[in-house]
Every structure is written in C-alpha cells, then in structure tokens.
Amino acid sequence: MADAGVIDRYLADLDRRLRGPGPVKGDLLAEARDSLADAAEAYRAGGVPEAEAQRLAVAEFGPAHVIARDYQSVLALAQGSRTLRAMLFAVPLMYSIWGLNQVFWIGEWPPLPGGVMPDWYRVIAHINDRIGWIAAATALLTLVASRYLARRGTSTEALGRLTGSVSVGMVGLALFCNVSIMVATLHLDPERMMSSPPMTSASLVSLLVLGRLMVLARRCFSFASG
C-alpha cells in the first residue's frame, strides 16, 4: 500500500510533542488514530487513492503542533486531577497513621523542658495538626469545582492551571508545616524526636509522601507548559 505510513508518521510526531500521564496520553492518541482512520476510509470510499486519502485525512484533522496544544491541556488537567485525588486520600491517611503511632507508642506527650510550651510552638503544632484535613478538603472542593466549571465550558487549559496551582499550594503548605514542627521540636527538645523509633519512622514517611506529592504537583505546571 503506497505511502501507507502518513497517518503513522503524523501520530508519531504528535506522540513526541505530548507529555503527561501515560494512560490518558494513550487514549488521546488512540482517539486520534480512530478519527484519522475513519476520515481516510471516507475518502477511499469516494474513490481517492490510499496515499492521498491519508494525506487528506491528516490535513483535515489539523497540524500536529495545534492538536498537540489542545491535547496537552487535557494531559495537564489529568495530572492535576490525579494529584488532587492522591492528596485527598494520602494526606489524611498519613496524618492518621502518625496520630495512631503517637497514641500507641507514646500516649500523652511529656512536658517540654521548662514545663511551659512557648506560644509560637503551640501555634505551629495547632496548624500542623489540621493542615492535612484542610489540604484534603481543599482537594475535594477543587475536584468538584473543576467538574462544574468544565460543564460550564471553562477551557481545559484554565482548569489544568487551577488544579496545578491548588496542588502545589496545598502540598507545599503541608510540607512546610511538617518540616516546621520537626525543626521546632528539634530546637526545643531534640530527644523527643528520637524517643520513639516508630514515631521517627512515621515522620520520615510523612516527608517522603509529601515530597512525592510535590513532584506530582509540579508536573502539573510542567505539562501545562508542554
């Protein structure tokens, strides 16, 4: 079949231009292939030779760089939604496990040296105790809002930037609070951080989880820019 690779070369070019979650990218390319195959079939049914039918189908579909821009916004939105869903479940679970470890291995926290908890430490602890649930609630609200806005015709590019911004902001805030309470505790009572290996392990796992979520969140902007 002469020049049978026109569609294949077009799809390969489109594939190289796209960055994002593999399953979503695969679905987009499969849909593009089906559309191109249907268009080429219609041209062939009208008596157009195979090679010309494929070229006409590709021309009708649109330049690869234009299609890639539209598809890339879909991939950015998919990455943002994926990160928000991960936040919705991982962050509360992480804080719950940490709290259960405290109850099981330590119980009531022993008093700090001097017997008085500084006001600034109390504020940091208060915020850190709640930030996980705030992050999860924000993720849920953003997912619901993005679905509503999508039905109202908001562009996938704008929605991708919205989900990416919320992901980076909330994960960054949770990571900052987590590190802050650790540094503050090390400053006031270093032995407290090392008094329970399970608690120390839970703290390190928390940092790893938040670090991974931050990587996912930053990819939202990377994919949005193509």
Image: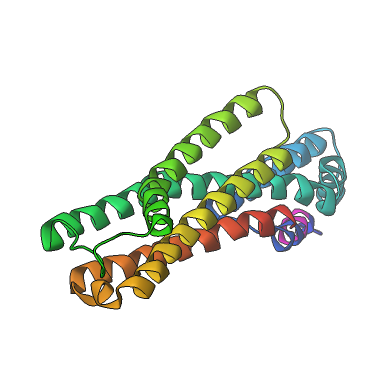
The residue positioned 86% from the left and 40% from the top of the image is: 60
Find residue 172 and report its horizontal and vertical position in percent: 54, 57
Relative side of 60 to 217, left or right? right
The residue positioned 81% from the left and 48% from the top of the image is: 54
User: In the image shown, does 151 or 172 lie closer to the viewer?
Assistant: 172
Query: Is residue 28 visible in this depiction of the protein?
Result: no
User: In the image shown, does 50 or 13 lie closer to the viewer?
Assistant: 13
* Main secondary structure of the magenta stretch: helix
Q: What is the image's colouring? A: rainbow
Is the residue 44 above or below the residue 203 in the image? above
Quarter of the image where one finds residue 20: bottom right
Relative side of 165 to 45, left or right? left
Relative side of 55 to 74, left or right? right
Quarter of the image where one finds residue 133: top left
- The magenta segment: 7-12
The residue positioned 81% from the left and 53% from the top of the image is: 64
Q: Is residue 10 magenta?
A: yes
